[in-house]
Amino acid sequence: MKYYSTNGQAPFATLEKAVVKGLAEDRGLYMPERIKALPQEFFDHIAEMSFQEIAYTVADAFFGEDIPAEDLRRIVYDTLSFDCPLVSVEENIYSLELFHGPTLAFKDVGARFMARLLSYFTRNAQSTSNNLINVLVATSGDTGSAVANGFLGVEGIHVYVLYPKGKVSPIQECQFTTLGKNITAVEVDGVFDDCQRLVKSAFMDAELNEHMKLTSANSINVARFLPQSFYYFYAYAQLKRMGKADKVVCCVPSGNFGNICSALFGKRMGLPVSRFIAANNANDIFYNYLQTGKYEPRDSVQTLANAMDVGDPSNFARIYDLYGKSHEAIVKDISGATYNDKQIAETLCQCLRDTGYQLDPHGACGYRALKEGLQPGEVGFFLETAHPAKFKTTVEEITGTEVAIPARLAAFMQGKKQSVPMTGEFADFKKFLLAQ
Ligand SMILES: *Cc1c(COP(=O)(O)O)cnc(C)c1O
C-alpha cells in the first residue's frame, strides 16, 4: 500500500518510509491510498471474535500488503496485551475504557503498535551497518509515558524522552524516568518548548543524522493513528453481544482529532456506527468549523482536560481529505459539542452522583456530549481516554471522592528515578547524543 500526503506536493511513500519519516516532505500528513471495506461476513461473526482477532482483521486491511501475516499477527497480539472493555454507565450509555494499558491512556495502543512495527522494519533492514533506531520525543507529560512504555524492551530501538524539569506531575514523571533498559529520560532545564526545540534541531543537524538514525514518534504517525481503529470495531462487537447494536452513536473526546479520525476510517471500512460526536473542551475550533464551515485555528487555552488543549488540531487535514474537502459531507457524519471547565467539573460530579461511575476530565466531555445528544432509539458509547487516577488531585478536589490508584500506576511510583540532566543549549544535547 502506498501513502500520499494531504498537501499533495510530496511523492507517494511506502509504509516503511511513512512510519520512519512521520511527516511528508511537504509537511502534509500521510494517508493510505485505499481504505478497504471489510466483508459482511466479518460483521456477521464479529460478536464471536476476540479483540485480537478483530484487530488483526482490521490491521490486515491496512498493512497486509506490506507485512507478512505471521509478523503482523504477532505485532497486533503483542500490542493488545490488555482489554478495552465496554462498561455500562446508564441506560443506553456505555464507556469504552481505553485506560487498561501500561500508562492508563488510549495512546498506549498506538505507541505499542508503532514500536513493534519499527522494530520489524529494523530487523528486516537490508544494510548490515548499525540499524539501531533512536526515537526522540519531547513531552509535557502524557506522550512521553505512552511512547516510553510502548517502546520499552523493544529490540533495535532506543528512546530519548525530553521533558521540562519540574514541569510535569510526579505521577507522569515516574512513568518514563523509572523504566531503564532502552529508555533514557532527559531532564531539560527549561520549558516544554525548549524540549521541542532541541528535538527539532536534532532532526535538522546533518552531522548528528550521519552519526545515528533518528526518528520521531509523533501522534500524527500512521503507525500510531491507524491502529486506534481496532477498538471501535471491538466496541461494536461488545454491543452486538449485548443485543444493542442498532443505531449506534460514538462520541470521542477530541484534541488533535487523531482518535476520532481513526473511527471515521473504521466507518469507511463498514463499521456500522450511524453517527459520531466530537466532544471539545473550551478549545472549540472544530466545533466552530462544524457550525460555520470555516476552519480558524488559534492559540490553545488551558483547561481541566489538558490533553485536549489544542488550538490547531493536526488531524483536521486528514478528516478534510477523507471527506473530499466537503463541509456538507462532514456534518452529515459528525456533530460537535464544547464544554468549559465549570461544565466539566459539574459533569464529573453529576455522573458520579447519579451513576456511581468515576469519569476523568476528558471522558467527562465525551459522556456529557453523548448524554445531551442521544436520540430515542439510539445506543451510544463514549471513549474514556484516560484513567481518573492520572488526574487524581484535580478529580478529587472537584468530586470530594477519593480516586484509587491502580496497581500498575502505583508500581511506577515505587521505581527509582533515573534521568540525564540537560541544559536548553542544543550544543550540549548534540554532544550528549554524539557520545552515545
Ligand atoms: C491525547 C488525548 C486526547 C485527545 O486525543 P486526540 O487523538 O488528540 O483527539 C483525549 N484524552 C486523553 C486522555 C488524551 O491523552
Image: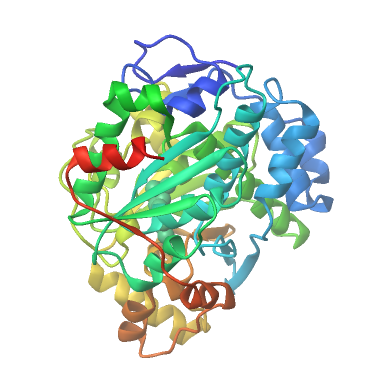
Q: Residue at x 29, y 33 (%)?
A: 202
Q: Position of residue 155 (x, y in %)?
A: 62, 42
User: On the rendered image, what quadrant is the C terminus found in?
Assistant: top left
Q: Nearer the viewer, residue 396 or 207?
A: 207
Q: Position of residue 88 (x, y in %)?
A: 62, 71
Colour logic: rainbow
Query: Residue 173 occupies which quadrant of the picture?
Result: bottom left
Q: Quadrant of the N terminus?
A: top right
Q: Residue at x 27, y 54 (%)?
A: 309
On the image, the x and y values in percent for residue 33 come to 54, 17
Using residue 382 as the reference point, say whether residue 166 is left or right of it. Answer: left
Can residue 278 be seen?
no
Image point (43%, 25%), residue name: 21
Left or right, residue 192 beside residue 35:
left
Query: As rendered, which of 306 and 88 lies closer to the eye?
Result: 306
* Residue farthest toward the front in the current orientation of the protein: 435
